Image (cartoon, rainbow, N blue to C red):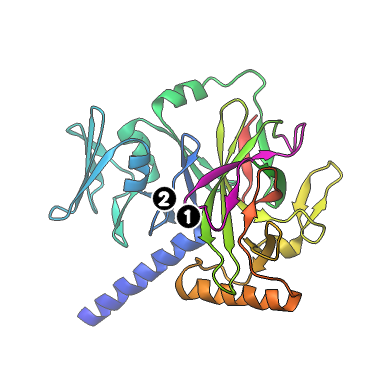
Amino acid sequence: MRTNMKGTLLVGALALAAISSAQGIRVTVNNDPVAFSGTQPMTIGSRVYVPMRGVFEEMGAYVQWQPAAQAVMATQGDKNVRLVIGNTLASVNGTSVAMDAPARLINGRTMVPLRFISESLGAQVNWIAPSRTVEIITSVIASERNQPPVGTTEMLIEDGTVIPVVLDRELSSSDSRVGDRFTASLRSTGSYSGLPAGTKIEGRVVTAKEKEGRNPGVLELDFERVMLPDGRSLAIDGSLIDLNNNSVERRSDGTYVAKAASRDDRLVYAGYGAGAGLIVGLLTKKPLEGAVLGGVLGYLYGELQRSNQQAADVRLRPGTEFGVRLDRDLVWRG
């Protein structure tokens, strides 16, 4: 019986992990994306669950785990929240608050039903189905958001659309560090697919590996936010893409879209010859570290040999042009 129970628990844990990785649910707080380590937001039954610590800390709360009681304490300003794993009753400033589903402990992370966030900390929570995004707006911004300007409409840019941008500051495989943030400006001097002139995209360095012997430098970029000229920030899921004819095609309205063959490509800058670096595709989706990085560098070295190029560092100067491919629909109020 005990063996069967362990097997059941293992199957359940694997099922939850599979649900989490497959669903791709994003969370933003005041339009800023929330990065989660380990367990990701997921749907269990008909409820959307989010990691409590990641969301509450992004909202300015201090979170403590009490292992003996299997409870979590969160403090934000004059509010104190306490909940117990498996219990549908939480305490907010000493008052019991019923949750529509109990808190769960999944892979060491406390997961809470989405609606509990609004009930405990007074935030406004929206589910944006087209982009599978949990949008959390704190009370101050929510009050402004509830009074949209006259004429406000919902805007949509479909996934696969490519936004042409120019880099605002220098990045390199030798000097940039993992986690460094940077911006790139919309290349268009007018509106582009609804984005006004002056729009910027904020990105993050994911991998920075300087040239070492025969191995070329590698620079991998990720894109997380669109910043509009009026100060608004929109969470995106964006990837690097080349603007050449092999990767994109131009629509009749002047916008670019990724070709079908390059919709899911994972692209990085690699050091080739004396140039700034070339955008090359990788055959792996795994994080570039350890043995995986060694294999990628070996692959890039082989490409260098075939093209008679010398290994170099990647150096992207201000004004470097490239594309940002949207991997999810971008929806916002225009």
**First-in-chain label (1 vs 2):** 2
Q: Is residue 314 above or below residue 88?
A: below
| Residue 326 x/y as whole percent | 65, 50
Q: Is residue 161 visible?
A: yes
Relative to 121, say whether 302 is above or below: below
Q: Camera-side residue: 283 or 280?
A: 280
Looking at the picture, how far across and down is residue 332, in whole percent? Answer: 61, 35
Q: Amino acid at mark 1?
A: Val
Which residues make up the magenta segment? 168-194
Residue pictured at 62% horizontal, 58% vertical: 314
Residue 191 x %, y % = 75, 32
Residue 59: within the magenta? no
Residue 175 is one of the magenta-drawn residues = yes
Give whichever of 135, 296 is nearer the camera: 296
State the residue position of label 1. Answer: 178
Q: Which residue is mark 2?
A: 47
Asked if residue 45 can be seen in this view, the reply is no
Specify the farthest residue to the left.
68
User: Is 129 placed left or right of 178 in the picture?
Assistant: right
Main SS of the magenta part reads loop
Task: Rate crowding at label 1 as few (under 14), some (14 to 19) or many (20 or more) other CA atoms within 10 Å.
Answer: some
Mark in the foreground, 1 or 2? 1
Q: Looking at the image, which residue is at 75% across and 62% down?
A: 260
The image quadrant of residue 73 is: top left
Q: Is residue 34 above or below residue 302?
A: above
Please tell me whether mark 2 sits on a helix, a strand or a loop: strand
**Count of number-bearing discs:** 2
Crowd rating for badge 2 (residues with CA inside 10 Å; few <14, some 14–19, many 20+): some
